[in-house]
Amino acid sequence: MKTPRSEFLAGARGTLPILMGAAPFGLIYGVSARSAGLTISLGQAMSSIVFAGSAQFVTVQLLGAGISAGVIFVTACIINLRHALYSASLAPYMQRLSVGWKLLLCYLLTDEAYAVAITRYQQSDESPHKHWFFLGTGLALWSAWQACTAVGLILGANIPASWSLDFTLPLTFIALVVPVLKRRVDLAVAIIAGLVAVLAAHLPLNSGLLVATCASILAGSLMEVMYGKRTESNVVGEEMVVEGRKEAES
């Protein structure tokens, strides 16, 4: 029987591989924040309050360019719209949780936390403590992010650009996604999402990611409907064959 403690520890352990990509990402944010003129305390406060890597990167870039606060706020909101999709995916599993739990997990929801937590929620066992797994995942990521951004803020520009640390995070996500592409539909949707993301990379405000997300959702939905109809048709055909054989034998 799964307990809250075992679920929490399993969530933290399940996050360890992805921390290899998130850690250098946090370092780079810290360095970028210092380069944009933020103090260590302000840079760390952003990591604690916003806790969204992509939005933090864009924010410090716009701050460094002297963009107005209103534009920065709207841009950050647009970038984080993908979290609404994550929330919609997780909502059916969290209906029975209290408002306090929902607010806490909402704060801890990130790309990485979703990727790890959704695999646990989709498992067939009836454990009532899966939200503790999510909590363990989210807190492990939060702690690592705070620590790594602090190191980046302190080191400032002492980390050489030749290290190319920003490439480790997409590599980590590729390693997470590839093993779960077990069906042709999953593979097709992943390819479509990747192609659209590349083609839409030039769009302003990093909206190419949202375009790719919407395109992959639409493609996946259409393919699931087509796949479901084909499967239903195959089942009906097999039933007709079986009935025909029974009639011939009788």
Image (cartoon, rainbow, N blue to C red):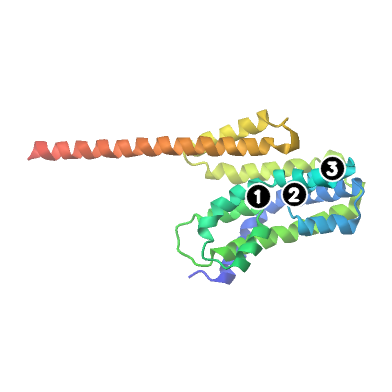
Residue nearest the observer in this picture, 157 or 33:
33
**Mark 2 surroundings: few (<14), some (14-19) or many (≥20) residues within 10 A:** some
Q: In this view, does 140 lie to the left or right of 65?
A: left
Frontmost residue, 239 versus 3 = 239
Could you say where residue 37 lies in the image, as x and y percent from the top left? 92, 48
Instruction: Tell me the SS state at disc 1.
Output: helix
Q: What amino acid does circle 2 point to?
A: Gly
Q: Which of marks 3 and 1 is nearer the N terminus?
A: 3
Return the disc, 1 or 2, that comes first in the chain's sequence: 2
Q: Is residue 144 above or below residue 159?
A: below
- The quadrant in which the C terminus is found is top left
User: Could you tell me residue 92's position as x and y percent?
Assistant: 51, 56
Frontmost of labels 3 and 1 is 3
CA separation in Å, label 2 and label 3:
12 Å
Identity of the residue furthest to the top in this view: 199
Residue 220 as seen in the image, left or right of residue 133: left
C-alpha separation, residue under disc 1 versus residue under disc 2: 9 Å
Q: Which disc number belongs to residue 61?
A: 3
Q: Identify residue for label 1.
A: 111
Q: Residues within 10 Å of mark 3 (few under 14, many from 20)?
A: some
The amino acid type of the residue labelled 1 equals Asp
Q: Which of marks 2 and 3 is in front?
A: 3
Q: Residue at x 87, y 56 (%)?
A: 42
Q: Which amino acid does label 3 sit on?
A: Gln
Disc 2 target residue: 53
CA distance for labels 3 and 1: 21 Å
